[in-house]
Amino acid sequence: MPARESGAPRKHLPEPHISPRAEAGLDAIDDYLFEQDSDVAERYARESDRHFHLLAERPHLGRASAYAPNLRRFAMHSYIIFYRPVSGGIEIVRVLHGARNLDEVFVDDDL
């Protein structure tokens, strides 16, 4: 990481906050991908982090989701990031494979 020049203004960037449920889902995805190919798992982790920070900086990039008020969705390859804008960034609520029956997943979900 390049050193910051002294006296340079520090810019507070919005941050992605990952819910425990989303963290558990991300861990499961990472475990699955790592079993298949560790390079793919590492690329997925980097891409996820990049997308999370992009969405934190631009929370309205994703489309509104019908599953809960203020919930938004953003496609990342085969996965869908569900998140909501919050003060100081976004909260990642869930990350799910796009082939899943989302109506079934969210029917009993307390969002």
Image: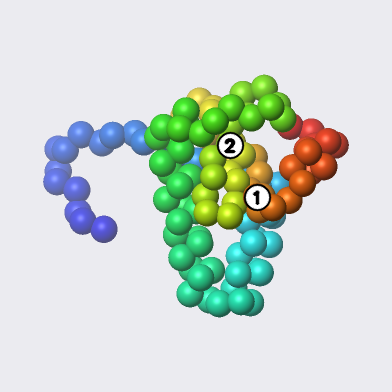
The numbered mark, 2 or 1, whose residue comes first in the sequence reads 2
Q: Residues within 10 Å of mark 2 (few under 14, many from 20)?
A: many
**Which circle marks residue 73 in the picture?**
2
Q: Is residue 20 above or below residue 57?
A: below
User: Which residue is found at the position 69% from the left and 27% from the top?
Assistant: 66
Examine the image and state in which quarter residue 9 appears: top left
> Residue 83, image x and y in percent?
59, 36
| Residue type indicated by callout 2 | Arg
Examine the image and state in which quarter residue 19 appears: top right
As drawn, is 109 to the left or to the right of 93?
A: right
Q: Residues within 10 Å of mark 1 (few under 14, many from 20)?
A: some
Q: Nearer the viewer, residue 78 or 18?
A: 78
> Residue 67, image x and y in percent?
72, 30
**Which circle marks residue 98 in the picture?**
1
User: Which residue is found at the position 36% from the left and 36% from the top?
Assistant: 13
The mark closer to the camera, 2 or 1, is: 1
Quadrant where the image shows the C terminus: top right
Quadrant where the image shows the N terminus: bottom left
